[in-house]
Structures are given as structure tokens and as C-alpha cells.
Image (cartoon, rainbow, N blue to C red):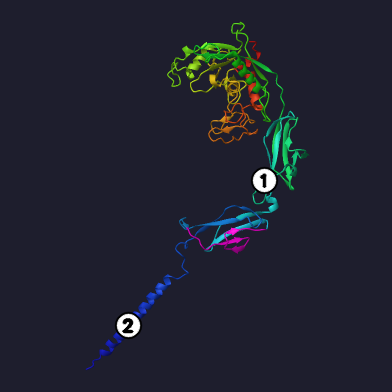
Amino acid sequence: MITRKEPFVFGALFFRPLFFRFLIVILAFNACKKSDPLTPNPTENNIVSIELLPDKTSLVANSQDFVIFVVSAKGPNNQVVSASDVDFYINGVKTKDPKFSTSVAGKYTVYAKSKEVSSNIIELTAIDPADARKVTLTANTGLIIADGKSIAQLSSAFTDEFGQSNQIANNEWTLYVNDEEIVGKTFHTSTPGTYTLYAKSKGITSNSVEIVARENKIYPMVSIPVIFHIAHYGDVVDEGLNLNASRVQVVLENINRIFSNDGGSNNPNSVNMHVQFRLATIGMEGEILEEPGIVRYDITRFDDGYSASVSDKANDRVLGSNERAHLSMETSWDPSQYLNIWVTPLEDGSSWARMPSVYASHPLPGLGTVSDNCTDCIQTWVPYIFVHTYSFTAISPTPVHEVGHALGLRHVFSDNNCQTSDYCPDTYSYSNSSNLPCPDNRGLLDRDNVMDYQITGITRNTFTYDQRERVRHVLKHGHWMSNLPQSTK
């Protein structure tokens, strides 16, 4: 028997599969919607800003030089996000290429765009190849002496648009001085002043080089009496440390040779210092010296470990720093009448000199000062030169070097990274820690100066114009030193 409920049951059974089919379609639709390509990629969906970063802002318009563009994209929290779809607009022309080259000189405006976000705008300059080529003039010195003999050597190089540089043969370029063409590739003059030099080659004018020609000063000759303190440990003359008079004479001759600029220097700023040193002939009490310029000491009693200093060891037959100071204070001859030089074995094998002081009314950079009326206010601070016995030879630059210190010259190198140097622009100053030149150099970059340290294969045979100015200042305004030129000893 069939009841009235049967059609309902049948309908329910009929429509239930349709319901599930409809539900599956809806779920499938939603799943498809989530992968809609119009939705931004998580790595790029939140680009807030992009920055265009070229590797350079100029290039040569030769179709070979090029600029590379790099884009940096940021999200809302300033995080870096990827930007793979970037367009570049160069003078309004769209391109995908991150590398730009051209054969047309001029200005180019460039920006980038990604996901409708535009970058900053940059300007590129494409240089005409003819303008990219250059001629460079260099001089071996920026300072010379206006004596007609001091010479600046000039050289010229050509750099093409590809950055390749080569020296130009002398017959392919012309030198101009103060806008006047001159013959040759060197410059010298007898007229002091500042000169502007440049070169012309291949239709190109070089950079300018400034050379200053200083007044050719002629100083009167100064004669300074020297007393050599020959130290020994009981040796007889001409044995051991007790050097003979001929050894003293040849060392003195070498000092005078270098001070006279007779050592073969090729430096354009090397000078005759017009200072000569002679063996003192008269003693402290007015007596005639049996050995001119020489006094001899058995220094055994000074080798006594004068202080607790590590360098002062008793009876080691060498003098430490305090032992030699003790020796100098006790045996020094009047420093206003004699230049004292002690020749003795020293603890560390070095030689030493104390820099002079100048009067406060005439200061000199790098030197201490004393009051103008100072007579014995630093009498215990005896000026000294100590030369290690084994450096006291006719060919050693050490005695000359130490005499230079005693007359106010500093080392040409700097011990504080060129914050200060030797206050002489025409010497080759350099940092002692890095060996790099100091920025105040105007002279020849050659380590030929007496006030440098010994370098194997390099001859130290030069005193310069600026060094002479310092020495003359000390001989005129130095405490004790200003009296030496008048000494009759």
C-alpha cells in the first residue's frame, strides 16, 4: 500500500545529490578565485617605493661605455621586497634593459617604474668622445729656485675615451708658461714668482700646473767651531774606541761637503747652506789646543748605571740615555762658543741630537722657545750631538744628519700621520707608519734628504732651500746657537 508520504521521500532522495553537487561547484569556484592572477604576488604585492641606483652618472657616447641601473624596492614597513617587473624610461622611452649606452652626446633623464610605482629621477650625461679625451701635464716639483739653474721637469700623457693612458713623445706636445709657448720640456727662470704651465697636444689643452720660483737668496758664509769629544775605555790613541785625528778630519770634511751641496744632489731645490764647520783651535781657558777640535775622555766612570733606567746598565761598555746625559752635562764646553759632538758607543746603536730652542720673540714651528732674556734658565739642558762610534765614518750620513738636528732640522717623515711633518714643503715628507706622502709636499718626491733615515741604495745628500731657511733662523734667533757664528774659538 502506498501512503501520501512516499512522494516526499522520493523528492528528498532526488534533490539531495543535487544539493551536494551545487556545494562542490561553489567550493571549486571559491578555490579558483583564490588563485586569481590579478591578486598581487606576496613578494611584490606591497611595493610602496622604489629607488633607482645607477652605477655612475656619466658615460662616453661611443656606444661601448654604459651605465647599469639597479632598482631597490621597499614595502610599507620599509622592508626590502622584490621587483621583478621593472620598466626604465629614458627621455620618456620605455625599455626593459637595465644597461644603457648611446652614441649621442647629451643629457638623459631616467626613472624606473614597477607596479605603477615610480622611482626617483636621475640625470645622466653622455660625453662626446672628443671631450672625454684629455692631456695631463705633470711636473716633478712645484717649487724651484729662481737662479736659472734649478729646473722643473715636465711630462705629458694622453688619455683616450676608453680611459687608456700613455705618455706623449716630446715632439708631440707643446709647453706653455703663463700662456706663452716655450721651447723644450723643462722650466727654469731667474725671476721669482708664480708660474702657470699647461700643455697642448692633439688639439687638446691640458690641466694647469703651478710652479713657484723662490728668490735666490745669497747668505754670508758662517763658520762654526766644533769640539769632538772622543770617548773610550782606556784605549790609547788610534786603538779601539780612541779614534785618531785623521778619522775626525775626514768626517768633518764630509759634513762640510754635504752642507756645501757638493754631494752630487740632483734635487732642483738642493742648496749650499753657507755653513761650514771647523776644528776649534782655542780651548775654554784661551789655551791653544794640542789637537785642534778634539778632547779625549776615558768614560769608564760614566758607565755606572746612572739611573734605574733599563738603558743604563753599569759596566756594559756602552752608554744608556741617562749615562750619556750625565756625560754631556759634566763635559760640555760652552755651547755658545762650540758645537759639541760626542763620539761614543751607545746602548741602542743609534745616534742622537737635541733640537735647539729659539727665543720667544722669533718662534719657529717644531721648535721650543725660551724667554728673550734667558741666559742660564735651562743651563742644565745642554745641547748635544752624540754619534755612535761605529757610525763615525767619512761616508756615513749619520754625523751630518745629527748636525742638521742640532741646527733645527726635523726628520722629513711624520710620526703622527702627517698632522705635522718637517715644516719644509720642498722636502719629501711622508707618514712613517704608512709610507704615504704627506699633503704638504711641493718638492721632488725623492728620498734623497739628509734628514731622512738610511734606505739601502739611496744616497742621502740633499739639504733644501726651506731647510736652509730654518737653519738660518736658528743661527740668528736660537738660544746659544745665535752666538756660534761669532765665536772666535
Query: Mark 1, residues whose alpha carbon is within 10 Å: few (<14), some, or many (≥20)?
Result: few
What kind of element bears circle 1? strand
Relative image position of residue 416 (x, y in whole percent): 53, 32
**In the foreground, 242 or 165:** 242
Please identify, in this view, whether the residue under mark 1 or under mark 2 is nearer the observer: 1
**What residue occupies the far left of the structure in this picture?**
1
Q: Residue at x 46, y 15 (%)?
A: 303
Query: Mark 2, residues whose alpha carbon is within 10 Å: few (<14), some, or many (≥20)?
Result: few
Q: Amino acid at mark 1?
A: Asn
In this picture, residue 80 sits left or right of residue 341? left
Tell me which segment is drawn in magenta: 81-103
Q: Amino acid at mark 2?
A: Pro
What kind of element bears circle 2? helix
**In the foreground, 154 or 180:** 154
Residue 216 is inside the magenta segment:
no
* Res. 388 in view: no
Quadrant, the N terminus: bottom left
Residue bearing the label numbered 1: 166
Residue bearing the label numbered 2: 17
Relative image position of residue 90 (x, y in whole percent): 61, 60
Q: Quadrant of residue 265?
A: top right
Residue 119 against residue 5 in the figure, above or below: above
Q: Earlier in the sequence, mark 1 or mark 2?
A: 2
